[in-house]
Structures are given as structure tokens and as C-alpha cells.
Image (cartoon, helix red, strand yellow):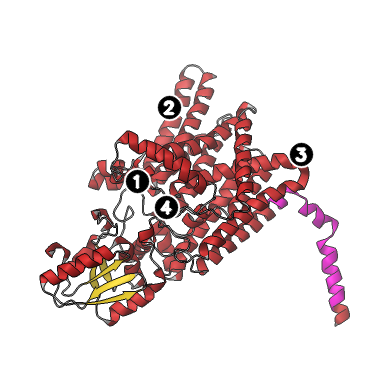
Amino acid sequence: MLTAMLTGARKIISYKFSQPALETLTNPLTQKRLAYLILLLCAASFKAWLITSDSVPFNSDEAIVALMARHILQGERPVFYYGQAYMGSLDAWLVASGFWLFGEQIWVIRLVQLVLYLGTMLTTARIGELFFTSWRTGVVAMLLIAIPTVNVTLYTTASLGGYGEALLLGNLILLTAFRIAIISQSSSKFLYGWWWLAGLLIGFGMWAFSLTLVYSLPAVIYLTWNVSRNIARIQGRKACSALALPLICIGVGFLFGAIPWWTYAFIHGISKPISETIGAAIAGVEGLPWQAGIWRHLTNLVLLGSSVILGLRPPWEVRWLVLPLLPLVLSFWLAAGVHTAGSLRRSSWPAAQRILLLGVAATTLAAYVISPFGADPSGRYFLPLTVPMALFAADMLVGLRDKIGNRVWLLPGIVILFHLGGTLQCITRNPPGLTTQFYPITQIDHRADQALIEFLQHNGETRGYTNYWVAYPLAFLSRERLIFVPRLPYHPDFRYTPRDDRYPPYDELVDRADRVAYITTNHSALDRLLQARFLQAGISWQEATIGDYHIFYNLSRVIRLEDN
């Protein structure tokens, strides 16, 4: 038997290392596919580890996606994310598919985000191959985002309703624009189909999440430039048709792709989705004149945003990550910036693609500074910078390899080690873990959620009032047996916005309840106010504390917020 095993082993070895096999392994296409597979497996393993490590809290924004997905399976057909009209329900539909396949679990929500991110990685590699005429550039860019910054890791693991989709759709918009530019130089019969597809993706992306507009605007400018170049070489009626047909095709595609958006606008009026797309819903939240707001956004971008973009700190606090490697990583990105500026002096055709990528980055930064969304100091609105940064850095590394050889791979190794170390630093401090909550008072230790659910069910408290950050995780995790509407403030100064109350059917359930409880978190001033109001109303009650949750329960009679 031993002889037979040794003989078999020799045959396997001789096959593995035969000349045809070696030729296959040295084939560029094989190398590219093997690199794709390895990097996708590494990224998937990293994400799977995060998902199963209980280090990413299940916050209210993600819980709304989960509830929407459940309601979709029950027959509802939401067009937009509950309570707003600038982010479509695409993420909820994808999560609903996951729930249908695997059950209603938090890990399923994040599995959807994992799949979306793998798609972003693959399309990033394709952009690198086409825009920089080097498949190695695409692979290296893929390597740099396989284990990304803490900011990118966070917002592509936990769902906030559309960030994963925006990254993937943005890449597809760029690839489609490039494809049109290539085939427009020939007389391909598929040209106008690609124009239609570009419009479809732009319209669909606008509905899915208006963040995709930072890709769409540069792509449209890029396509306009290409059309103008082609028209300059044509005269007469052909020039008119060369201009009109692309406009018609992209316009029809846009209308078709944005059908959910147009349907909502037809029913509810067009002013709401337009105003919310440009940030009107949160305009004035800073209480500053427009010019002062822009100055603050610019200051935040320089002082706070830059460090989040480069991964030097987590988006929810000012704390430097992996200090020994930080100067090296900062130097790496500065060098990539210098290289990017130099790359624009290359031949005009490759430079056009580089300008398109820079256009995405510039539009992202400009939108942050001039729009009301700049009032949000979290790093999520900087996510579209991820792909352009990785691609330009990869282009630099591939160029350096020709000069200094394989030693160049120490540089991305340091960057990846820095990203991994920063993520480890964050998850070992739990709470807050990898949290989407940048406001400390909203950073709730959700590890006590199950204990809270059991306490409320044991005491018969199934309806009541709480704040936004408690209401929706509690509803989803209890399978909507516990409905507490977000009518309480969580800000220390008692500021409250009715936009926190996202789902009217829950209000009806609480309004009909003959027994209510109150749940607060990290707000002693609100606790004292409720106690005073209860005493003033002449009722008795009990109190309990479970983790960060403070519960007022067993009220002697129902007292509603409108009674106070």
C-alpha cells in the first residue's frame, strides 16, 4: 500500500509540474484569474470573520433595512428607505432575497454587503485593466481594497441602506462610459445599446442612492467630450444624428432605470425626492448661514475627513491607529498623490480615463463641501474615493516594480498590515466596536439587547416610547412583538426631529395600546424629566437598568407623550 501511495504521489507531482502545467501557470490570463480568486477569498474570509465576531453593532439604520426586507416578504412594496426619499429600497430588496433563502438573521444582511463588495473588487480590477492598460494595475488595486481602511470596512459590512450598491453601481457606470468611448471610434451596431445601458445605470443608481451621482456627473461629462470629438470629424446630417441618437438612447435608458423614482414622484409629488436628493431634509441642521456652513464643511474635510479617508483614524472618534506604521502609510499616500499629478502629463488618451477617475474624486469632495450632507462628520460620504485612490496607488506600484523589482510589494504589504491592525484595534474596544455611530451618546452596547427583550416580555411591556437608536433594533430582534416608537430625544439638549419616527403603522399600534413603557439610553436629564412628569401626573411606576437601557415600566395608568 505504501508503495502504491508513493507511486501515486509521484504521478501527481509529475503532473503538477509538467511543462504544460508550468506554461499554464505562467500564462497572464491564468495569473490574473488566480490572483482574482485568491484576493476574493481573502476579502471574503476577512468579512466573514468580522460578521461572526460580534464586533459590528446592529444599529437602527441597519435595523430599518432589515424590517423593510421582512415587510417585503410579507407583501409590502416600499420604493424608498423608510422616512426619506433620497435612498431607494434596493438594499432592502436584496436583503429580502437573502432572508427568503437563509432566514431573517443579522448575518444575512451582512452577507449581502459582502457579495456587493466582492462585486466592487472585481469591477475595480476591470477598471484598472482598461483605464491603465494593465491587468496588474487592476489586481494591485484589488489587493489594496481587499482589506481596506476601517471606514470602508465598516460601511461595507454593516448596511445603512445603499452604500455597497452605490460603490458597485458607480464602477459599472464608469465601465459603461469607457466602453462607449472605445466602440464609438468604430461603427459598432451595439453602440446605441451601450448608450441606453449607461442611461439605465445612471437612472437606476439615482433611485438606489443619490450618492451615485458623483459617478454619473463625471461620466456624462466624459461621454460628452467623446461625442464632441467624434462630431468634429463629421459634417452635415450625420453630425446631427451622431449627437441626437446618443442623447435619445441615454435619456430613454435613464427614464427606464429610474422608474421607481418617477413612480414615487408621480404619486407623492416631484418636489420631495428632488429636494431630499440635494439634502434639503437635513438643511439647516447646523444652524449656520450657507457660506459659514461651507466653511465648516471644508474645515471638517481638511482636519477630520482627510484622516478618515487615509484610514489614520476610525470615523467615530479622533484616535490614531497603529501609530508605528502611520508615518509610513501617510508617506505612501502622499507619494501616490504626487504620482497621480504626474500621470496627467501622459498621452491624451490614457489621461482621459485618469481625469474621469479624478472627476469622481473631485465631485465627491465638492458635494461634501457645498451640500447639506457635509453636516454629517462620519466618513460614509467619502466612500467613492476608495476606488480612484486604490487605482492610482496601484498604477504607481506597478511602475515602481519595473524600477526596483519585487521589493516594491513591501509597500502594499505595509498598507494592508496597517488596515488590518487598525481594524483589530477597533474591534478589541467593544463597545463601541466597529460602529456607525459617530455621536458618543448614541453608542449603545447592543450586547444587552436580548436581556432587554426578555425583561420586557416577562413584564408584559410590549408597547411604548423610546429613541431612534433603540426602537428599530428592538422591533426586528423581537420579531415585531415589541413596538416602541421613537418619540423620545437622545440629544443632551433635548433636540428631536419627527423624521426619527419612520414607520406610521407602529404609531397606530402604540396609540391603541392600553399599557406603555418608556426606554431611555445614556440620558440622565431625560430620566429626571420623565420622573418629574410621572409624579406630576400622580402615577406610580417601576424602574430597571439593563446595560445602557433604562426602563420605566409597570405604570399605574397609561401616560402618553402628548399628555405631558
Where does label 1 land, which residue?
259
- Considering only vertical position in the picture, is 243 above or below 334? above
Residue 6 colored in magenta in the image: yes
Badge 2 amino acid: Ala
Dot 1: element: helix
The residue that label 4 is drawn on is 162
Which amino acid type is shown beneath numbered disc 4?
A: Gly
Residue found at x 63% / y 27%: 345
Between tags 2 and 3, which lies in front?
Answer: 3
Is label 3 in a helix, a strand or a loop? helix
Inter-mark Cα distance, 3 to 1? 52 Å
Q: Nearer the viewer, mark 4 or mark 2?
A: 4
Q: Quadrant of the N terminus?
A: bottom right
Under circle 2, the secondary element is helix
Give the amino acid at mark 1.
Answer: Ile
Residue 245 picture location, percent across and down: 44, 30
Instruction: Kindly check if marks 3 and 4 are in contact, taking CB atoms under 8 A apart as contact.
Output: no
Would residue 200 be seen by someone viewing this image from the given angle? no
Q: Is residue 173 left or right of residue 369?
A: right
- Crowd rating for badge 4 (residues with CA inside 10 Å; few <14, some 14–19, many 20+): many
Residue 346's mark?
none
- Is residue 194 shown above or below 439? above
Q: Which residue is mark 3?
A: 403
Mark with earlier residue (3, 1): 1
Q: Which sits earlier in the primary sequence, circle 1 or circle 4?
A: 4
Q: CA distance from mark 3 to mark 4?
A: 41 Å
Task: Name the amino acid type tagged 3.
Answer: Lys
Residue that mark 2 sits on:
244
The residue positioned 51% from the left and 66% from the top of the image is: 51
Q: Earlier in the sequence, mark 4 or mark 2?
A: 4
Name the quadrant containing residue 405: top right
